[in-house]
Image: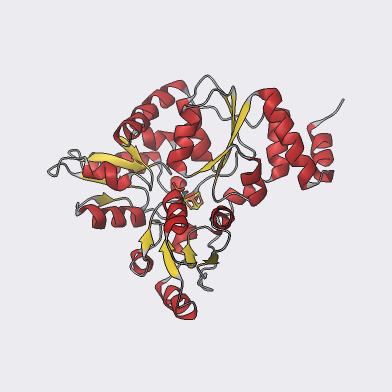
Amino acid sequence: MTTATDMQKEAAGFSTQELLQRVEALKKEMNAVILAHYYTLPEIQQAADIVGDSLALARAAEQNSADVIVFAGVYFMAETAKILNPGKLVLMPDAGAGCPLADSCPEEEFRAFREAHPDAIAITYVNSTAAIKKLSDIICTSSNAVHIVRQIPPEQQIIFGPDRNLGAWVKKQTGRDMLLWQGFCYVHEAYSELYMIQSKAMHPGAELIAHPECREEVLRHASFVGSTSALLDYTEKSPSQSFIVATEPGILYEMEKRSPGKTFIPAPKDPANPRSVCKQMKQNTLEKLYLCMVNRAPEITVDEQLREGALKSIRRMLEMSA
Ligand code: 13P
Ligand code: SF4
């Protein structure tokens, strides 16, 4: 009998090309769709049918005819796909790839935060657990947060979480005074103003572009701020030939693919905080992708009551960002 360990050993012997071919064959056999985030490894993006930002991937999870969704991203992304597709098998190459930002917002503490502000509605970043989504009124992503907040009547108080940097940026864009949960993403928090100034001085022709999960002291030096998809579109359309990119460097693969003649410089890390790579996204290896399809595991499941509760706030996002 072939055991999981035997298969693991066998997969370890395959070349990248062999693994890509096997994944392709399994995809057809299983009627599976592979969704991957821009921060995953290049070979994962190569194997994927759709590579996108959180909003595009949530939409893709909802609008497809596959029987199986294989999600190469972090846990909350696959969980969102399952919430939207309860009848489908949702797999992840490594179910241990969590998002520390999502984990920085525990259910009981968030409930207490809401109870302390009973008149406020909660607009919550998709980087959150299903339990937090259930406690929220509307979900948002970095590409629709501003658009959603602008639709809320001005007298309505808003709680925004869990990312304080995205929250501060949305406050600035909309002029709304929101109550912010104090979470952050360790990858984007690692960029500092000093190193951005130095990098701009070193590359005088390059435009600094940044994800809104970066701190305000970084964002104020950027000529463009946006979600991963918005950053990609910007680099394609801008006449500039080089860019300093202040977001997870996995996105450089797609940037270089879309704009072959342009130069993309990963924004420098602060040596005092050298953590600007998302190690959870990189847990999605090609070998694990292949094995999760062979084994049809790990499977993502969500308790039905929790799913129904979380679905409401996700649906509101999809309606409000249509
Ligand atoms: P995007 O929705 O911009 O792709 O962001 C997802 C994310 O996790 C950023 O850290
Ligand atoms: Fe979470 Fe940050 Fe990784 Fe995005 S980059 S998945 S917010 S830890």
Is residue 284 in view? no
* Depth check, front residue: 132 or 176: 176
Relative height, residue 47 to residue 100 (above, below): above
Q: Residue furthest right?
A: 1
Q: Position of residue 46 (x, y in %)?
A: 65, 45
Taking the image as shown, residue 155 lies to the left or right of residue 238, namely: left
Q: Count the marks: how many?
A: 0
Task: Identify the residue at horizontal 84%, vertical 39% (top origin).
Answer: 10
Task: Identify the residue at horizontal 54%, vertical 49% (top origin).
Answer: 38
Taking the image as shown, residue 318 lies to the left or right of residue 292, namely: left
Q: Position of residue 243 (x, y in %)?
A: 48, 66
Taking the image as shown, residue 240 lies to the left or right of residue 67, namely: left
Q: Residue furthest top?
A: 87
Quadrant in the rendering for residue 26:
top right
Which quadrant holds the N terminus? top right
Is residue 89 in view? yes
Quadrant in the rendering for residue 215:
bottom left
Q: Residue furthest left?
A: 155
Relative height, residue 205 to residue 315 (above, below): below
Q: Position of residue 57 (x, y in %)?
A: 48, 38
Which quadrant holds the C terminus? top left
Task: Identify the residue at horizontal 23%, vertical 50% (top origin).
Answer: 178
Task: Identify the residue at horizontal 47%, vertical 45% (top origin).
Answer: 53
Q: Position of residue 110 (x, y in %)?
A: 33, 42
* Depth check, front residue: 170 or 223: 223
The colour scheme used to paint the residues is: secondary structure
Quadrant in the rendering for residue 295:
top right
Relative height, residue 156 to residue 200 (above, below): above
Relative height, residue 123 to residue 211 (above, below): above
